[in-house]
Image (spheres, coloured by chain):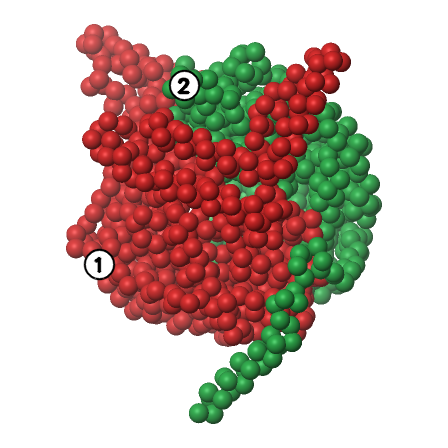
Chain colours: A red, B green
Amino acid sequence: MRRIVSALAALAVSAPLLAQQVQPEVFTLDNGMKFLLLPRTDQPNVIAAGWVAKVGSVNERPGITGISHFFEHMMFKGTDTIGTSAPDADAQYRDAQKAIRARMNEIIWNEQYRRFFNGEINDPWNPANDTPELVKLRAELKALMDSQQGRLGADRIAELTSKLATADADEKAKIESEIALLKAEQDKARSIVKDEFDKIYTGQGGSGMNAFTSYDLTFYFINVPSNKFELWAWMESDRLSDSVFREFYSERDVVHEERRLRTESTPTGIFQEQFEAMFWSSSGYSWPVIGWSSDLNSYTMEEAMRYWNIYYRPNNLCGVIVGDFNPGEVKETIKRYFSRLSRGEMDVPPVVTLEVGQLAEMRMNAECDCQPSVEVRYHTVPFRHKDAYALDVLSAVLNGRTGRLYKSMVEGTEIASDAGARQDSRKYAGAFSFNAEVKGDSTPADLEKAWYAEIEKLKNEPVPALELQKVKNQFAASNYRRLKTNFFLLLQLGYYEGLGTWEEINEAPAKIDAVTADDIQRVAKTYFTEKNRSVATYTRKAGEGAAPEDPAIAALPAPMQAQARQIAQQIAKSTDIEVLKGNLEQMMAQAAQVPPQMKPFLEYIKAKIESRIAELEKSAPAKQN
Amino acid sequence: MKHSIAILSSIMAVSTVVATAPAQDLPKRPEQLTYRPLTFNAPKASDYRHVLSNGVVVFLAPSKELPLIELSMTFRGGSFLESADKVGLADMTAALLRTGGTEGLAPNELDEKLDFLATEVSIASSGTVCSASVDSLKANFDESLALLMDMLTKPRFDESKTKIAVDSAIEGMKQRNDDASPILDREWDMLLYGADHFEARVPTEASIRSITKDDMAAFAKKVFNPANVVVAVTGDFEVPEMLSKLEKAFAAWPTGERMPVPPAPTATVKPGVYHVEKEIPQGKVYIGSRGITRDDPDYFAALVMNEILGGGGFTSRIMKTVRSDEGLAYSAGSGLDAGVWYPGQFRAVFQSKNATVALAIQLIEREFKKMRDTPVSAEELEVAKQSFIETFPRSFESKDAMLGIFVSDEWTGRDPAYWQTYRDNVSKVTAEDVQRVANRMLDFNQMAVFVVGDWDTIAPGDGLGGKAGRAKMADFFNDQVEHMPLRDPMTMQPMK
C-alpha cells in the first residue's frame, strides 16, 4: 500500500505528462483548404500524408445511403489524365452508360418495384427477375463496360488460348490470328488504363495507400518516400480537381461484395446493423455507412455530382502531413498544387435533424451462430461535449484487467467471458455501450442484470481516489503512446479535425484530468436510465455450426435433458478422481432401485463419470513429476 | 480592425504564391516530376548489438522523443514443443505467467500495481517463439522491469487464475464454427501441413483441461530463460546505463538448454477441391500449396512474381481481374509466405457471392496459366521491383520495427548481408526468372482449392434460370470434390 501511494504522489506531480503538445503548422489556402504540417525527424525517409473530407453517412438521406462510402471507391478510379488513354472516348462511354442505367432504374423503380410489392417477384434488383427490356439493357450496359475496359471477347480469347496447347500447326496459326484480331479490337475500344492511380504510387514507393469512411468523415492516406512529396501533391490535387467517376456502375458490385463480407456473412453483422437502425430514431446515424442494398443499386450520376460539388470542395477538406520533411518546401508545394482547386459554389448544408429523446426502453432479441452476448446502449453526448470526458473516464474505470467489469463479472461471479464499456462520441450525437459475452451456463439476462448492478454502484458511491488516479495515470501514459508513430498521429489529427477540430488532441488530456468522482456519479445518473436504454441480446441459434448437443443427451427423454446437461458439465469441470469414483460407486449402489425410465439417464451419467476419470488418470502421471 | 488587416495580409501572402505558380505551369503528368535522390543505407544489426555477461544478446536503439521505454524479449520455443495431448500448453503458460501472480505478489496485487504505474506487460506464445514485453513510462521502467522478471522467474500459477484462463479458452472454442474465416484457416492449415503438425494443431477441451501447474512450470523453465532469449529495447535511455540495468536484472536468472528448431511437416498437399459447408451468402476461398523457404535461390524472383500476380494490391493481376474488371470480390489477391525452417506456402485468396465463386476460381486459374506461359511485361516488372526497392526504407522506419528485424534475424540465423544486398537482389530479377518461378510454383493441378460456403448455391456457378454460365464447380479437378465435415468445436472430431 505504501508503495502505491508513493507512486500516486510521483505521478500526480508529473505535470509534464499533460504538457506534451502536438503543434502542427496550420494554414488555409484561399480556396478554403486547410493543412496541418507536423515535421518529425525520429522516423527518417518517410512521410505519412492524407486528407480528410468532412462528410460521412450522417450527411446522407434515404435513397442515397452509402454514397459517401461509394465516393471513397470512386476516388481511386481516376481523372481525365489518370486512368484513361483516351479521355474523350472515355467520356462518351460514361455518357452512354449513364443513359442506359437511367432507363434501367426507371424500369426497376417503377415496374419491378410494383411487381415486388404485388408479390410477383421476390427481389426487384435480382437479374433473374428482369423484364425482357431489362435483360437487353443489362447486356448493352455490360458490353459497353467491357468495351471501355478493353475486355470485349475476353472469354472467347481464353477459350481459344486453351485450345492452343492441343492444336496442330495449321490450327494453331488460325487460332493465333483470330486471337490477334480480337486483341486488336479490344485495344481499339479500350479507353481505361486500369488502376493507374494505384500503379503510379506503387512504382514510386507509395505504401499503405487506403481510405476509410465513417459516419462523420472520409479519410484518404498513404506513406510516400520523403523525396516524393510532390508526387502526393500532384496525385491528390489531380483527383480532387478532376475525378470523373469512372466505372460508376461496375464498382457497385464490389461494394455489394464488401457488404457481404463485412455485414452479411459475419455472425452478428446484420443484427448489429439492425440494432443501430433501432437505436437511432431520427438522426442520420440510423443507416449503415456502407448503405442499404437498394440504395447502393440506385445511385445516379446526377446525385454523385451534386455530392461532389458540395462535399469534395476544398473548403470542406483538410490535408495532414506528418513525417520527415522541410515545412517550408512542403508548404510551397501544397500551395502550387492545391490552389488549383476551386472553392465550392454551394455552402455545405448543416446537418439539422437532431436525435429525438428516447421515451421508452427498446429491445432486440437476436438468434445467430454466435456466443450468447448482450449490448446495453444509452444515448449520451457528442464529440467535445463537456460530459464526454467524464464518460470516457467512467468507461476506463470499468475496463481492463483491474477494471470493475472484469473483476465482478469475469472473475467474481464468473458469468462473463468478456465484458467492456465504451463512450462513442460522434460529431452530432453520442452513445455509451456496455457489451459482454456469456460464460458457461449464464445467459444474456444474467449479464444485463449484473450491468445494472454496476451502474447502481456508480450512481450511489463515488469512485475512490486511488481508483480514479489509476485510470488517469493510464490516460497520461497513453498521451505519449499515441504519439509513437507518424501514421497514427496523422490519423488522430485528421480524425479530430473531421469531427470538429484537431486541437482536441491537445485539449482532451487536461479535460480528462479534471474529471472528478462527482462528475462520474453525475453522468451515470443522467444517462444510465431505463427509458434511455436499448438492449440487444444474442443467443445461439440451434443447429449445425453451433456448439453441438451431445447426441447421447438428445437421445434421452426430453424432461431429463436439461438435468443431464447440467450434471455432465459439473462432471467435466471436476478434477478430483476420488470424488468422482465415490459418486460412481454411490450411483451404482442405487441403480437397482431407480425406475426403468430413468435407466438411460443413469447410464449416460455413468459413462460421463467414467470417461472423465479416464481423462484425469491419463494426465495424472505428469502431476507426480 | 487591426485583427482583420492581419487576416487580409495573410490571404494576400497566399495569393502571391499562387500568382507566381499558376495552375497551367504544373507538370501535365506525374511521370514528368523529378525527385532529388534519397540515399538510404540499410542499418546494420552489429551497430545495435550487445552481449551481456551471461551471453544474452541485446539490441538497443535509444530515442529521446518520448519519455517511454519499451523492452521486448523473444524466446526460442513455442507450441511446436507441446506433446500431442497437451496442445495449448504454450498459450496457457504464457497466459498464466502474465496473469497468475508471482511468489511475492498475488495476481490482483500485481495487476493493480502495473495498472497504477500505467505499465503494459504482455506475455504470449506462437508456433515457433514466445515473447514477453514491458512498455512503461521512463520513470517507472526499473520497477516495471523488476515486476516482469519476477513474473518470468518466480511465477505463482495461481489456481483461480488458471481456472479463468481455462474457462476463457473453452468459451473461445465454442465460437470456432460461428464465423467462416476460422474454419477456413484451421482446415487449410491441416490440408497443407497435416493435422499432426504444430502449424495445424489446435487445442481441444480435453487437452486444455489436462494441463497442470507442473506442466506450465516445466514449460516456462524450459523456454523462458537466458539460453533462448534475444532482447530489444527502444525509448528514452542511455546505452551504458541500460546495459548495466539489464546485467543486474538478469544476474540471477537461471539458464537452461537452447531449444531446437521447429520440426518440418511430413505431410504433402493432395491436390483437389475441398469444401466445408457453411450457410452464408458469400463463399470464402483459398487456392494454393506449399511453397519455398526464404533461402531458396528463387526467393527474390518469387517475391516479384507474387507481387505482379496478386501481392501488389490494385496493381496486381488477380485484383484487377477478379475485383476491378469483374466486380466479383472486395478483396482478392495472393500471398507468399517463404518459410524459415521449411517451405512455407503460396496461396490465392478471395471471397465472392456464391454464384460467382466458380467464376473467380476460373479467372485465377487463368492468371496462373498466363504467368507460366507468357513473360510479364517490362512495365509490370519495373513497377513491382521499384515498389520493393522504394518502400525498403520503410521497413526500418521506426526503431521498434528495425529492432524487430534484427531480433528475428538473430534467432533465425539469417545472413546479416541479406538487408545490405536486398535491393540489388530485387533489381536483378528478370522476366525470365519470374516465368521460371511461376512454372515452378503456379501449377493449378498441384494445388488445393478450398471453399467454405453454401455448396448448393456455389456448385452450379453463375448460370441463370437453367442456362449455363461461364463457370461451375464441376469444371475443376474432373468434378471431384472432397466434402469435409465440420468439426466439433470442443473435440475437433468430425461431426456427422
- Where in the figure is residue A93, as x and y percent of width and height? 51, 43
Q: Which residue has dot 2 on it?
A: B456
Q: Looking at the image, which residue is at 77% across and 28% down?
A: B436
Q: A31 above or below A407?
A: below
Position of A428 with respect to A258 (left or right) is left
Can you say whether B97 is above or below B353 in the image? below
The answer to whether residue A100 is seen in the rendering is yes
Q: Mark 1 points at which residue?
A: A356
Q: Rounded to the nearest whole Å, what is the CA distance between mark 1 and mark 2?
A: 46 Å
Q: Would residue A72 appear left or right of B43 to someone viewing this image? A: left
The numbered disc on residue B235 is none
Tell if the residue under mark 1 belongs to the same chain as the one under mark 2.
no
The quadrant of the rendering that contains the N terminus of chain A is bottom left
Which image quadrant for residue B82? top right
- Residue at 40% from the left image edge and 16% from the top image edge: B466
Q: Residue B73: x and y, percent?
A: 65, 48
The crowd level at tag 2 (other Cα within 10 Å; few <14, some 14-19, many 20+) is few
For the point 44% across and 26% down, the residue is B354
**Letter of the chain that mark 1 sits on in the rendering:** A
Q: Which residue lies furthest to the bottom in this view?
A: B2
Task: Name the chain letter of the residue that bears numbered label 2.
Answer: B
